Image: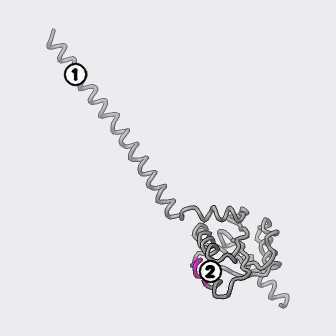
């Protein structure tokens, strides 16, 4: 490959590292072309799966400010550049790796923080962003309902107490 081609490849990879929310490094040794196509389809539009050259990708990652992945660029490497929800992509990679043991998740980076393979698997165990937001909204709504009931209970309890005092006073006043 000519020097300008390598520089262009590094620039493209650097841009992908900078524009993605997360990047997951995998080893694809033993996977067929058809299996890699299937993996790309399973990742959907949230991620782009690219087979890369280690030296060029290492240079691109360093230029993007990611130096924690340097030791993981060994053997045949492919990177899933995640632009959408990282949880969905981690789930897709985990599920594909269960069906195809030749796919090995090496590690990755999420918002500039290095992740080990185990941390990526833990990320895959999380629920999707939409589900977590729905649960948060439900919890907030429940707390608001409880607060409204509490604020409504105080004045009504005060009114009942005042009515009870009036009734008692009328009773005592009538007995005298």
- Whether 105 is among the magenta residues is no
Residue 127 relative to residue 110: left or right: left
- Whether 40 is among the magenta residues is yes
Residue 17 in view in this figure? no
**Residue 27 image offset from top left, x and y in percent:** 73, 76
Residue displayed at 46% across by 56% down: 137
Give, as a single range, the part of the protein colored magenta. Answer: 38-45
Q: Nearer the viewer, residue 100 or 87?
A: 100
Residue displayed at 60% across by 65% down: 124
- Helix or strand or loop: what does disc 2 sit on? helix
What residue is disc 2 on?
A: 39
Residue 77 relative to residue 162: left or right: right
Q: Are marks 1 and 2 in contact (CB under 8 Å)?
A: no
Residue 138 in view in this figure? yes
Residue displayed at 75% across by 76% down: 14
Q: Nearer the viewer, mark 1 or mark 2?
A: 2
Instruction: Give the quadrant of the C terminus.
Output: top left
What residue is disc 1 on?
A: 166
**Residue 37 image offset from top left, x and y in percent:** 62, 85
Instruction: Give the quadrant of the N terminus.
Output: bottom right
């Amino acid at each position: 490959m000519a020097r300008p081609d390598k520089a262009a490849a590094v620039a493209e990879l650097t841009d992908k590292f900078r524009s993605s929310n997360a990047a997951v490094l995998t080893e694809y040794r033993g996977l067929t072309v058809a299996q890699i196509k299937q993996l790309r389809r399973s990742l959907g539009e949230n991620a782009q799966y690219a087979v890369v050259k280690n030296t060029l990708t290492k240079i691109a990652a360093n230029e993007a400010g990611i130096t924690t992945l340097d030791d993981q660029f060994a053997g045949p490497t492919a990177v899933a550049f995640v632009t959408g929800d990282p949880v969905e992509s981690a789930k897709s990679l985990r599920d594909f790796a269960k069906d195809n043991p030749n796919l090995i998740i090496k590690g990755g980076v999420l918002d500039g923080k290095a992740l080990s393979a185990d941390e990526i698997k833990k990320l895959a165990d999380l629920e999707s962003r939409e589900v977590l937001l729905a649960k948060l909204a439900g919890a907030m709504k429940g707390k608001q309902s409880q607060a409204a009931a509490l604020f409504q209970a105080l004045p009504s309890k005060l009114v009942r107490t005042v009515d009870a005092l009036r009734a008692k006073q009328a009773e005592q006043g009538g007995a005298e």
